[in-house]
Amino acid sequence: MKKIYLDHIAATPLLSAAREAMLPFLTEHFGNPQSRHAAGEIPRKGIEEARKQVADLIGSEPREIIFTSSGSEASNLAVKGILGARQKKGTHIITSVVEHYSVAHPLKRLEREGYAVTWLPVDQKGRVRPEQVAAAVRNETVLVSIIHANNEIGTVQPIQEIAAVTQEAGVLFHTDAVATVGIIPFRVDSIGVDLASFSAQQFYGPKGVGALYVRRGTRVHPLIVGGIQEGGRRSGTENVAAIVGMGTAALEARKRLHAEAPRLAALRDRLIVGLMERVPLIHLTGDPIHRLPHIASFALEYVDGEALIRRLEKHGIFAASGSSCSAEGLKISPVLTATGLPANIAQGGIVFSLGMETTQTDIDAVLSIFPRCAEQIRQVSPIYTSLAPHTPSDQR
């Protein structure tokens, strides 16, 4: 049975070029990059070359890149680091109700510590309106943090327009760009954000390494102290091999960016149209236009998302029912309910995220198998069978 992996938003396979670049730093070039002798020189140069490669991917200066252990750490550093550095400015933050937990959870904790957080709602497509941000800004507003694109429903936010609002208001703007950097064009010099967090594993780099872009002149307090690494902004001995792998993956992502996104979007649309035609009582989630090219997400009535994932897996198809950071702890996605879906439909959420190795043959296999899997689950629901006795038997 062929395996069809459609969960690239959770993790991507490691590029062979990245793996080859990493290997010397796992063997002969094992020295500490902070050592002042010869054994530290090559690792130190490897980190700085990777810093330049990552900076080139997003259009920043190398010194504006801070390497972290993940996108989640980068987002935590952005939120807590800015608030720590600007305590005298104010205690108000603006964010949205569809943020990743690496932003939402720190802000909820900060609320308990006395900070004021404005949680902006989204429309049925999962978008925040720039005028909402403008209306929420106060004199004591320190930071706006709005995700660039949601990893569950694929909706891309109007980041440039929001950045224009924050620039006019003189407020710092952070975006969680984990789902977008390396997938669609993301250039800080044109978007206008002050901070952006992202992760290597989203663009075929190694796990366990991410980065935070911090616009030159913006101060952040470190989360981890005790060393001089990353200019004193993130202490701890560097994971040299992972950082080098991230740099190589960034270099390769930059090469394929403009050709790969349209290819993925065509496959995504084939999947969306095909499932909407073949499966009754199915809802497309997210914005149909302002959408990541590799995300097709749905919610099905009378279907449990987890049960559907398990049934698809028996056919060699790997998908997700929500964020990989929340699958174990939450039954119903707060992102789906934030868009207005009732809980009984939101529990049928499923996310397909396509990748470099995804083919039209893979999509056609899903279009063949998925309707049968959904119908098989529905047939054990007494509510469904009583409301929909007309369901075609050839789908059962």
Image (cartoon, rainbow, N blue to C red):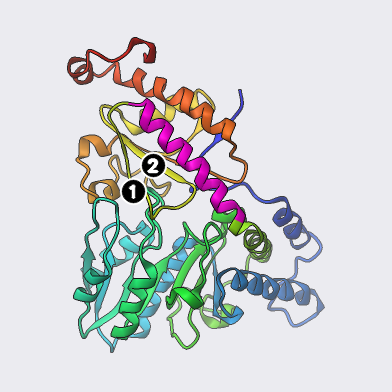
Q: Is residue 110 magenta?
A: no
Residue 151 visible (yes or no):
yes
Q: Check disc 1 and give the amino acid type.
A: Gly
Q: Residue at x 75, y 63 (%)?
A: 25
Q: Which residue is mark 1?
A: 286
Q: Which residue is mark 2?
A: 297
Corner quadrant of residue 242: bottom right
Q: Residue at x 26, y 64 (%)?
A: 108
Give whichever of 380, 356 is nearer the camera: 356
Report the span colored magenta.
Answer: 259-279
Describe residue 343's horizontal placement relative to residue 152 as left or right: left
Corner quadrant of residue 131: bottom left
Q: Quadrant of the N terminus?
A: top right
Give whichever of 53, 278 is nearer the camera: 278
- Residue 358's disc is none
Q: Check disc 2 and give the amino acid type.
A: Ser
Q: Up-down: is 86 above or below 393?
A: below
The residues tagged by marks 2 and 1 sit, at their Cα atoms, a distance apart of 7 Å
Q: Is there CB contact under 8 Å for labels 2 and 1? A: yes
Q: Up-down: is 55 above or below 282?
A: below
